[in-house]
């Protein structure tokens, strides 16, 4: 009898470990194409130093103090309860240890490489004392509504007076009414003016028509007359009566505190309902397009590479390359570095334009001084002015491919 149970346990352990290995392999494969080209985290070497950010005329300045990150898609890349999308968002909200920290750590390892008491304490030395503390993050995988609301409520209660909460939700929606985007192209709109104009509202979303500089105002539908294609996010089985479904109205009670909301879903348009319905603090909202952009590479479906919008927020140039069918081995590093410098200079120029604009909505002005939120906003704006329909053509021209 004991032999039988031991055999069953061994078979169970083998299956579990085999699943772990498979998940790790898929997870690493999702980012192997561009591994080690540029860190996802905020680097003082590659990004603007917080003290060098343009000053914004605002009555208060908020800092990212807490974040809730949750992603769930069928057959998506994940390791345990960490999906590739939440991993990327988690990383791009962290500080990259500075060069001096790397050098001091390497010296300690070289001096104390032996075993025993001389070995360094990695738990104590993992933090870089030259950098500010990282914000707190709560990563939720397939949360029930009650669990999600309980975590969000606790964070709101503990939020510092100068803090803002980032809520990142990535999931599929529920099919309802279908939106038929209008066709046709109109006159060109100045990109800089279009950038500032979109920041006059505190809810921005990607749409092939409304944000494209090539679209005529006569082709832009009235948002109030458009029906939402999808109305909630699913973080679990759809046939459970909405126990794992998050609706826009679920977030409204928490708008008594400053929120920075990122919705990456085919139902993102429904979350525009939050704008104007807040209970005290206008929420900063950025939404993904209601229709997905087809990728060129056969290996770049959602469950293989993660969400395209999340990639643009965390690694914009890599997302550009995947969009046009380029992977790591196919990219010439000289061209890639030139494109990286071009993108960085463009984002910095947009950031300066926003900081000096007198038309900037106060919701954006009060968070533009935070390096992490500022970087997310500018990266989001890097694809909004041109529109998803023209994005691939522009990348081809910029990289001279």
Image (cartoon, grey):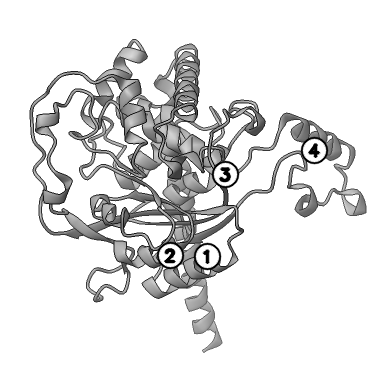
Tag nearer the camera, 4 or 1 = 1
Circles 3 and 1, Cβ within 8 Å, touching? The answer is no
Q: Position of residue 147 (x, y in %)?
A: 44, 73
Which of the two discs, 2 and 1, labels the residue nearer the N terminus? Answer: 1
Circles 4 and 2, Cβ within 8 Å, touching? The answer is no
Farthest residue in the bottom direction?
A: 1
Mark 2, residue position: 254
- Residue at image location 29% in from the left, 50% down from the top: 265
Residue 105 shows which numbered tag?
Answer: 4
Asked if one can make out residue 3 in the rendered structure from this viewpoint, the answer is yes
Q: Secondary structure at mark 2?
A: helix
| Closer-to-camera residue (196/142) | 196
| Closer-to-camera residue (384/33) | 384
Q: Secondary structure at mark 1?
A: helix
Tag nearer the camera, 3 or 4 = 3
Mark 3, residue position: 61
Tag nearer the camera, 2 or 3 = 3
Farthest residue in the right direction?
A: 117
Residue 71 shows which numbered tag?
Answer: none
Q: CA distance from mark 2 to mark 1?
A: 7 Å
Q: Position of residue 382 (x, y in %)?
A: 38, 28
Q: Is residue 189 above or below residue 157?
A: above
Circles 2 and 1, Cβ within 8 Å, touching? The answer is yes
Residue 156 shows which numbered tag?
Answer: 1
Q: CA distance from mark 3 to mark 1?
A: 18 Å
Q: Quadrant of residue 241?
A: bottom left
| Closer-to-camera residue (168/36) | 168
Which of the two discs, 4 and 2, labels the residue nearer the N terminus? Answer: 4
Q: Is residue 324 above or below residue 250?
A: above
Q: Position of residue 4 (x, y in %)?
A: 49, 83
Which of the two discs, 4 and 1, labels the residue nearer the N terminus? Answer: 4
Q: CA distance from mark 3 to mark 4?
A: 34 Å
């Amino acid at each position: 009898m004991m032999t039988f149970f031991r055999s069953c346990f061994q078979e169970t352990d083998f299956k579990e470990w085999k699943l772990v290995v498979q998940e790790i392999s898929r997870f690493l494969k999702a980012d192997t194409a561009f591994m080690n080209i540029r860190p996802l985290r905020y680097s003082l070497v590659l990004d603007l130093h917080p003290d060098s950010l343009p000053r914004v005329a605002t009555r208060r300045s908020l800092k990212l103090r807490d974040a809730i990150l949750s992603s769930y898609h069928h057959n998506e890349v994940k390791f345990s309860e960490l999906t590739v999308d939440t991993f990327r968002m988690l990383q791009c909200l962290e500080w990259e240890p500075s060069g001096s920290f790397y050098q001091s750590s390497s010296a300690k390892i070289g001096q104390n490489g032996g075993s025993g008491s001389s070995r360094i304490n990695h738990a104590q030395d993992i933090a870089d004392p030259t950098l500010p503390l990282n914000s707190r993050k709560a990563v939720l995988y397939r949360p029930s509504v009650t669990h999600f609301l309980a975590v969000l409520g606790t964070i709101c209660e503990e939020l510092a007076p100068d803090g803002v909460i980032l809520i990142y939700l990535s999931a599929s929606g529920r099919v309802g009414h279908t939106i038929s985007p209008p066709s046709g192209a109109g006159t060109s709109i100045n990109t800089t003016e279009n950038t500032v104009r979109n920041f006059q509202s505190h809810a921005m979303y990607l749409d092939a028509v409304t944000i494209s500089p090539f679209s005529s105002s006569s082709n832009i539908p009235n948002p109030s007359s458009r029906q939402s294609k999808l109305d909630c996010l699913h973080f679990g089985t759809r046939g459970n009566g909405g126990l794992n479904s998050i609706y826009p109205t679920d977030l409204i009670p928490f708008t008594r505190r400053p929120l920075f909301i990122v919705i990456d879903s085919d139902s993102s348009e429904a979350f525009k309902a939050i704008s104007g319905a807040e209970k005290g603090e206008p929420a900063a909202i950025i939404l993904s397009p209601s229709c997905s952009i087809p990728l060129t590479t056969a290996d770049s479906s959602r469950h293989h590479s993660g969400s395209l919008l999340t990639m643009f927020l965390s690694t914009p140039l890599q997302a550009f390359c995947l969009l046009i069918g380029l992977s790591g081995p196919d990219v010439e590093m000289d061209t890639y570095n030139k494109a990286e410098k071009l993108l960085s200079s463009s984002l910095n120029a947009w950031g300066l334009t926003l900081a000096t604009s007198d038309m900037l909505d106060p919701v954006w002005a009060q968070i533009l001084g935070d390096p992490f939120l500022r970087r997310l906003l500018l990266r989001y704006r890097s694809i909004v002015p041109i529109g998803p329909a023209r994005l691939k053509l522009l990348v081809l021209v910029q990289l001279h491919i």
